[in-house]
Amino acid sequence: MRTPSPDDERSITVTITDAGRTLLGKVLPGHIKVVSGLLFEPLSRDDVKALAGLLAPVSDHMRSTPPRSAAPRRKAGS
């Protein structure tokens, strides 16, 4: 389902349907296995912990900072 974003008039909020959720449930486990193998297999447990520690502040920052597209647009001529 698509609805206008309440935060940005240029955006659309998409909500997954039950059929989409079912399909995702079938596809996602295989996708996670492939990505996990490619990304984490060559790393030791300590490497994974270090990577998670390095990326945590980045993730926190990204979640706390709204995307530029969420900022209100200036009116023409302003």
Image (cartoon, rainbow, N blue to C red):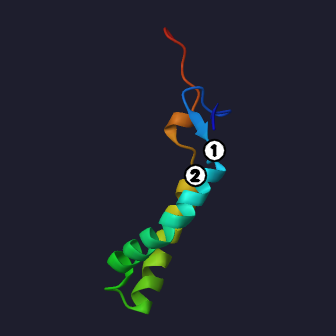
Task: Please name the residue that numbered disc 1 is placed on.
Answer: 15
- 24 above or below 68? below
Residue type of the residue flagged with mark 1: Thr
Q: Which residue is drawn at 35% across and 86% down?
A: 43
Looking at the figure, which quarter contains the N terminus?
top right
Please name whichever residue, 2 or 13, is drawn nearer the observer in this view of the structure: 2
Q: Label 2: how many residues lie within 10 Å, few (<14), some (14-19) or many (20+)? A: few
Left/right placement of residue 77 relative to residue 42 reads: right
Say what secondary structure mark 2 lies in: helix
- 31 above or below 46? above
The Cα atoms of the two marked residues, 2 and 1, are separated by 10 Å
Task: Please name the residue that numbered disc 2 is placed on.
Answer: 20
Label for residue 7? none
- 34 above or below 23? below
Please state which of the two labelled residues, at mark 2 or mark 1, is closer to the viewer: 2
Disc on the earlier residue, 2 or 1: 1
Please name whichever residue, 50 or 38, is drawn nearer the observer in this view of the structure: 38
Q: Which residue is drawn at 38% across and 91% down?
A: 44
Q: For residue 30, what is the image quadrant?
A: bottom left
Say what secondary structure mark 1 lies in: loop
Q: Position of residue 27 (x, y in %)?
A: 48, 64
Q: Position of residue 28 (x, y in %)?
A: 50, 66
Q: Which residue is drawn at 57% across and 44% down?
A: 66
Residue type of the residue flagged with mark 2: Gly
Given contact means CB atoms under 8 Å apart, are the residues at marks 2 and 1 in contact? no
Please name whichever residue, 77 or 2, is drawn nearer the observer in this view of the structure: 2
Q: For residue 14, what is the image quadrant?
A: top right
Q: Residue at x 44, y 91 (%)?
A: 45
